Image (cartoon, rainbow, N blue to C red):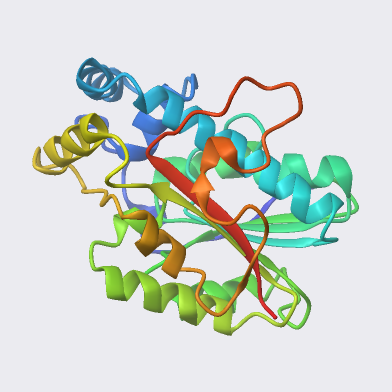
Amino acid sequence: MSDPATTPGPAAHHKIDTSVPHSARIWNYWLGGKDNYPVDEAAGDAYTAVFPGIVTIARSSRAFLRRTITYLVAEAGVRQFLDIGTGLPTADNTHEVAQRIAPETRIVYVDNDPMVLAHARALLYSTPEGATAYIDSDVLDPDSVLAAAAKTLDLDRPVALVLSNILGHVADYDRARSLVTRLMGALPSGSYLSVNDGSRGIDPEFDRAQDAYNESGAAPYILRTVDQITAFFDGLELVDPGVVPVTRWRPEAGSAAPELIGEHGGLARKP
C-alpha cells in the first residue's frame, strides 16, 4: 500500500480544539465512528434528542456516496476523483470503494480541518497501482484546490467531483453555485459532479432542528430546497433517477423500501 501525499496549508498549523463541538466530529459520531470527543457526543446527543432522524440522514448520505462511487467506477469508467470536504475517514471512503473495483484509480481528498489532516495521513492508504493525496485547502478557494489536485490527477481526463454535505457550509447560495461552476469548468467533457446536501421543506422537524443548531453559535449548515440543489447541476446531464432523496438514488437490490428524508442528491455528466 502506498502512503498518501499530503499538501499542507494554513490549517495544518492550527491546534485541534477539543473544548467546542465540531461538525466533522459530530457527523463521525452519528456514523458510529470513534474519532470524536465528549463535547461532540454531547452536541450530537442534544441534536438527536430534538431530531433523531439525523442519524438516518448521516448514514444514508454515506450509503449514497458508496453507490455513486460504485456507479462511476464500474459503469461510467471513471478513474479519477476529487473529493472536497471529505470529513473524517470512516468505513467505505471514496478511495476504498473505487480501488476495490479498479485498483489504478487516483483520488484527491480536500479538507481544511487539522484533525481530518492527521487522520488522512494515518489512514488514507492507496493501492500500489493507484494513488491518494490529501490537500489542506478549502472549497472557497477553488483555484488553489485545482492547482494542487493537478499534481495527482490529470485534469485533461475525466474527473468525478464529489461534494458531499459541503455546499451547505457556504452560506451564500449564489457563491455556492459559482464555486461549483468554477470547479466543473476546469474539468473536461466526460467528467461528473456528485452532490448531496440537506434539503429544506421535506421534514419540518429537521428544518427546526437545523435552524436551532445554526442559531446556537456553531458553524452554520444551510439546508437548501430541492430546486436549489438541482440547480447545482445546471448545464450537466443528470444520471437517472435525477435529484432525489439519497435513499432513492439507485437503492441496492433487496434493501428496505426507500425513505423520504431531508437529504437529496444526484449525479450528472459534463457533456
Q: Nearer the viewer, residue 48 or 120?
A: 48
Residue at image coords 67%, 56%? 240
Residue 83 against residue 263 in the figure, above or below: below
Horizontally, is 165 left or right of 200 in the view? right
**The C terminus lies in which quarter of the figure?**
bottom right
Horizontally, is 71 left or right of 113 in the view? right
* Camera sees residue 74: yes
For residue 40, which quarter of the picture? top left
* Residue 236, position as x, y percentages in the image: 60, 75
* Residue 108, position as x, y percentages in the image: 64, 59
**The N terminus lies in which quarter of the figure?**
top right
> How many numbered marks does the figure carry?
0
Q: Nearer the viewer, residue 10 or 188?
A: 188
Q: Nearer the viewer, residue 88 or 241?
A: 241
Horizontally, is 237 left or right of 61 in the view? right
Residue at image coords 38%, 73%? 177
Q: Nearer the viewer, residue 211 or 238?
A: 238
* Residue 86, position as x, y percentages in the image: 52, 48
* Residue 26, position as x, y percentages in the image: 34, 30
Residue at image coords 29%, 34%? 203
* Camera sees residue 1: no
